[in-house]
Amino acid sequence: MNTHIFGQKVFWTVLATVTLSAITTNAAETRYKDRLFEVSKEVDVTYAEKVPKLSSLHDIAKLTFSFGDSIFFYTSESEVTLSSMKMDIYTPKGDTEKKRAAVIVAHGGAMIKGSKNDFSQLSITYCDSLAARGFVTASMGYRTGVSLRGEGNSLSIDSADFGRSVYRGVQDINAAVRYMRKNADKYGIDTNRIYLIGNSSGAILSIENIYTNNESEFPSYINYGDAPDLGPLNLYGEQGVGFHANGGVFLWGATHDPSIIGSSEVPVLLIHGTEDKTVPFKVGHPLDGAARMLKRMAPEEYAPLVEAIDFVVETPTLYGSYVIDSILKAKNIEHETFFANTSTHEVYDELEYEKTVQTKVFDFLFKLASSNSTTSIGKHTIASRASGIQMQKGNLSFIVTRGNNLKYTVMDLRGRPAMSGRVSANESVNLSSLSNGVYVLHVQGERAIRIGISK
């Protein structure tokens, strides 16, 4: 035999073996951290059947449908339609691992709007990005909607009805976790590594999933008068498996009762803006200024009609990330926090924080998924410099106090550009051409801010 040829064969065989080993080792080391896979998506997977959804839409809700920003108000809770609850499941293509970590993403929307197809709140982005890293992910829909009381120009939302809406949402997120756990073999999921990412109202539902055990831990006032019985906490969906997730990322969330935390040692990441009034950072009533915001969201042609409505929104007291963090620290329970000073709701709307928030979410989930124990601990609070953007009367114009030839963009809440240009220090930019509504103002080098236009 030709020894030279034999030597070449041995060399290439050894090289291939070493290379394959290196690739395999690298994949094992970087799973859950780096993008390794293309992603497959299974749409409209039913995770619970015959779930009663409110069905008597209020005329105000129908009006919102006409201008493309659907808000689900109902006239009562006595009329329901039995429906299937859906989620979209994302899996890494070509992955042969049979025991993978899973993440369920719950969108926000104040319990009156939002969907599993949400782009603006990054639900789809998180699902796709995490699945590419080797997770099994799901963007879940849950029951939204709250009763709108009153007649004519006098309308109100009662705090008990908000409480009932949250309870329905917790029933749904519990069912979603049980579905993933029950179908672990089908999707290649490790039943001990199922995590949640919740945004705003989705974060509230996620917190309740982690810490509540049964319906007795919810306020008794939600079962008022002749309101239909909401049933046990785990009434719908798969049965026979646990409903608690094994970890959670709470993006600007809160709980109805901090005592439910008890002795739970489930690892969590809390992210919140310290000036958040929509979901309070400390203690308060959520949706501060909701009535004004809803009116501002109406198109200009509906403004006179909407302005004539006396709209009162009452919400339950909530305890935000600051309180949850304080309790976890007092109990010496490992967790992580990221509190953005001077920031308000939905920190990822702010260019200064968008990448930071996503990185912290990915890093936290990587540590959970790649370890058998809770390895993450610490508090990371960042301080923001004072904003260089100064809004003028009625938010109809703005100036910047520093910089030269800075690019600015005004985006609506659906992420569509409404206005753009450049501005230098002490120059005034006129926004009066914008229609009534709520916008996000981005100025190069400054923290983005939300503004309401009402003329």
Image: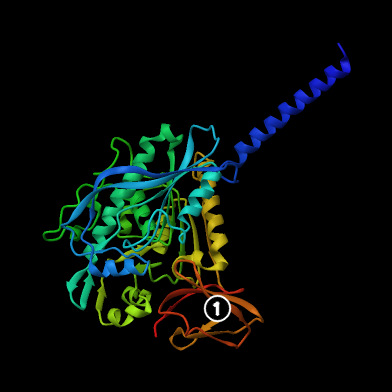
Q: List the residue tagged with mark 1.
A: 387
Q: Residue at x 45, y 64 (%)?
A: 272
Between 333 and 368, the one nearer to me in the picture: 368
Question: Which quarter shows the N terminus?
Answer: top right
Residue 312 position, x and y percent, is 25, 75
Closer to the camera, 377 or 359? 359
Image point 28% across, 49% down: which residue? 171
- From the top left corner, tell me how far across and down residue 141 is, in percent: 36, 52
- In this picture, residue 401 sits left or right of residue 49: right
The quadrant holding residue 61 is bottom left
The image quadrant of residue 455 is bottom left
Find the residue positioned furthest to the left: 226
Q: Please give the name of the residue rendered at 15% of the width and 60% of the height, measured from the top-left corner.
A: 224
Q: In this rendering, is residue 239 above or below 12? A: below
The amino acid at mark 1 is Ser
Query: Can residue 426 be seen from the camera position used here?
Result: yes
Up-down: is 208 above or below 353?
Answer: above
Q: Is residue 383 shown above or below 338?
A: below
Give neighbour class at mark 1: few <14, some 14-19, many 20+ (Cα, 10 Å): some
Position in image of residue 270 (x %, y %): 45, 58
390 on left or right of 239: right
**Would you identify the image quadrant in which residue 429 lies?**
bottom right
Q: Say whether residue 375 is visible.
A: no
Q: Which residue is painted at 43% across and 86% down in the image?
A: 394
Please, what secondary structure does the residue beneath circle 1 have? loop
